[in-house]
Image (cartoon, rainbow, N blue to C red):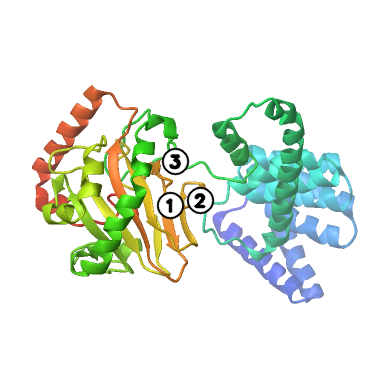
Amino acid sequence: MVSSENDARLRGLLQQCERAHAARETLRAGELLDEARRLAPEHPLVLNLSALRALEAGRGDEAIDLLRRALAADGRNITLWLNLAATCRRLGRDDDEAQALEGALAIDPRHLPSLLHKGALRKRRGDTRAAALVYADALKTIPPGTRLPESLRADLTQALETVRANSAELDAFLGKRLQALRDSGASSERVDHALDALLGKRRIYHPEPTQLHVPMLPAYEYYPREHFPWLPQLEAGSQAVREEFERVFSQDQDRLEPYISYPEGVPLDQWAELNKSRRWSAFFLWRDGRPVTANLERCPRTAELLASLPVHAVPGRAPTAFFSIMDPGVHIPPHTGVTNSRLIVHLPLVLPGNCRFRVGSTTREWRFGEAWVFDDTIDHEAWNDSALPRAILIFDVWNPLLSDVERQLISAATTAFADYYGDTTLAAHHGAGTGL
């Protein structure tokens, strides 16, 4: 057993040895390694460095023996297992390499270099499907935004290419197997999304309300139309609503206001560019559960249409209804709404083209006369890439899957929540409450 003083000296010798070797001072490196051997011939670090020098000299079997002796003394050292695997790989001993990699992964099943080498071994052996599965596990261990060492770049590139190629082959394979079912009329948007996620073609997004999250509701991005039998009635009023909007837009510019309006001292995050800006503006018809009477009087047919629909109703909180105007070139950044107990309705009015809207993994273009309902607690964003303003009517409705009792409870709880904190706290801004 090496004393603490000798251990420090030993590690210093090995570090000097490695620096001398890197500087191509071969004689000096050998002298330092010999001194370390005399001090602790069976120390795992001495055996490891001796093995690396033996391998460089072409003595592969000796290197493997030295590494196995090192592992006998320190079997929890992943570096030793990786060096043994690399030595076996260099000698073409695939089975021994596989065993060494499993030794490393037994210590840390998420060890990225070990998984990358395991995937590479399976690929060399011709089992590209198994390699893709291992590579996929390796890629999952990398947290977003992680800066990885340059030494792993080639291995990561091969991993990504293998996973993508395998996904394409699997996609074609699944397509052939499912073709007969699809030809017979079998279809499911939900299953298609699941398969796309499995193949890495789409993500599965989940609701992330900033306030009230009602569990056990489906995470639809755009809700199926059959939940809203009144949608055709809404769409039939598109022309009348557009005419009223156009009059307002030409005659009532003074009543348009920034949709995002945070007070001073509030963290703006993604809203910094649009805060208090009329590049994304609103003409409110209903606001926080209260009618904007003067504005409703300017739009009587729109007011009548809204009055006929089952809008979201919470005293002092909902409904909110407004014309939403995006100036040319505006991008509304990704964000989520306050609660999935209500959903957002869009009725497109003025569409100059190149106006996109993404909810979760699905991006659509607005089309005049085609309304949709979506869950704004799922990450969403919008673009106006045209040279003209884009305008839509937006309002909120109850989530149709809530029972009457649940709506009553949520309404009462929301009112109590507001009373507890006070209107000043909760009314800090209008932004991102009723999406886009």
Which numbered dot is residue 363?
2
Q: Quadrant of residue 167?
A: top right
Q: Nearer the viewer, mark 1 or mark 3?
A: 1
Residue type indicated by callout 3: Tyr
Residue at the spot x=33%, y=69% of the render?
273
Residue nearest the observer in this picture, 119 or 166: 166
Count residues near mark 1 (Cα–Cα under 10 Å), then give few for <14, some for 14-19, many for 20+.
some
Question: Are dots 3 and 2 in contact, CB under 8 Å?
Answer: no
| Above or below, comparing residue 263 to residue 43 in the picture | below
Residue type indicated by callout 2: Thr
Q: Which residue is mark 1?
A: 368
Q: Which callout, 2 or 1, points at the residue further toward the start of the chain?
A: 2
Residue nearest the observer in this picture, 435 or 123: 435
Q: Which callout, 3 or 2, points at the residue further toward the start of the chain?
A: 3
Residue at the spot x=70%, y=41% of the render?
134
Q: Position of residue 195 (x, y in %)?
A: 62, 36
- Badge 1 marks a residue whose secondary structure is loop
Whether residue 229 sits left or right of residue 422 in the image: it is: right
Residue type indicated by callout 1: Phe
Distance of label 3 from label 2 (alpha carbons): 10 Å
Q: Which residue is mark 3?
A: 222
Q: Position of residue 104 (x, y in %)?
A: 68, 43
Residue nearest the observer in this picture, 271 or 353: 353
